[in-house]
C-alpha cells in the first residue's frame, strides 16, 4: 500500500480516503490479527522472508504437495492463487476440510 504508483508495473495510486479505507481493512483482517490456525501457520512460514504470495510459503507448498501440478493449469483453476477454485468458503476467511473440493472432481 506504500508504493501503489509502482504496483507490479502499474500505477494503482488511490486518493487518501480510499487508501486509508483499504489499509484499515487489510490491517483489521491481517493474519497478525487472526485467531485462525492457518493464519498462524502462514505467518510462521513467512517469518522474515521476502514473500508476496501465500502460495510461495513452505506451508502452502507442503499442504498442496500431493496435488498434481496440471490441476493448477486447468481452465476452472487457472493458477495456484485462485484459492476459491478449491476452497469454496475462503472468501469468509475459512478453510474447512469439508469445503475443500475433491481433487478427483477435476477432469483432465
Ligand atoms: C487445486 C485446488 C486448490 C487450490 C487452487 C488451493 N488449494 Fe489449498 N488445499 C487443497 C487441498 C486438496 C487441500 C488438502 C490437502 C490435504 O489434506 O492433503 C488444501 C489444503 C489447504 C490448507 C491446509 C488446510 C488444513 O486444515 O490443513 C490451507 C491453509 C490451504 N489449502 C490454503 C490455500 C490457499 C490460501 C490457496 C490460494 C493461495 C489455496 N489453498 C489454493 C486444494 C487447493
Image: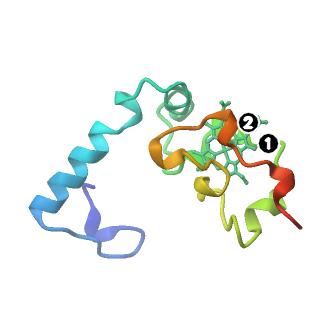
Question: Residue at the front extreme?
Answer: 98
Q: Is residue 7 visible?
A: yes
User: Is 40 on the left or on the right of 61, as rendered?
Assistant: left
Q: Quadrant of residue 100?
A: top right
Q: Which mark is residue 88?
A: none
**Looking at the image, is 27 positioned above or below residue 86?**
above
Q: Residue at x 23, y 49 (%)?
A: 23
Which residue, given by chain and number where applicable, does mark 1 sit on? 65
Q: Quadrant of residue 84?
A: bottom right
Residue 81: x, y in percent? 59, 57
Mark 2 is surrounded, within 10 Å at the Cα level, by few (under 14), some (14 to 19) or many (20 or more) other residues, namely few
What is the number of callouts on the image? 2
Q: Classify mark 2: helix, strand or loop.
A: helix
Mark 1 is surrounded, within 10 Å at the Cα level, by few (under 14), some (14 to 19) or many (20 or more) other residues, namely few
Q: Quadrant of the C terminus?
A: bottom right
User: Is 6 on the left or on the right of 8, as rendered?
Assistant: left
Beta carbon at label 2 within 8 Å of ligand 1:
no
- Asked if the residues shown at circle 1 and circle 2 are in contact, with their CB atoms under 8 angstroms apart, the answer is yes
Residue 71: x, y in percent? 80, 60
Which residue, given by chain and number where applicable, does mark 2 sit on? 62
Q: Classify mark 1: helix, strand or loop.
A: loop
Colour convention = rainbow
Ligand 1 image-quadrant field: top right
Q: Quadrant of the N terminus?
A: bottom left
Residue 80: x, y in percent? 65, 57
Q: Residue at x 81, y 51 (%)?
A: 103
Residue 62: x, y in percent? 73, 36
Beta carbon at label 1 within 8 Å of ligand 1:
no
Residue 52 or 88: which is nearer the viewer?
88
Amino acid at each position: 500500500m506504500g508504493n501503489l504508483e509502482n504496483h507490479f508495473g502499474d500505477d494503482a495510486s488511490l486518493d487518501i480516503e480510499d487508501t486509508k479505507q483499504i489499509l484499515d481493512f487489510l490491517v483489521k483482517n491481517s493474519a497478525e490479527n487472526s485467531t485462525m490456525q492457518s493464519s498462524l501457520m502462514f505467518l510462521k512460514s513467512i517469518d522474515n522472508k521476502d514473500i508476496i504470495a501465500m502460495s510461495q510459503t513452505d506451508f502452502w507448498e507442503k499442504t498442496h504437495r500431493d496435488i498434481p501440478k496440471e490441476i493448477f493449469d486447468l481452465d476452472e483453476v487457472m493458477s495456484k492463487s485462485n484459492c476459491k477454485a478449491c476452497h469454496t468458503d475462503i472468501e469468509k476467511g475459512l478453510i474447512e476440510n469439508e469445503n475443500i473440493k475433491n481433487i478427483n472432481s477435476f477432469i483432465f
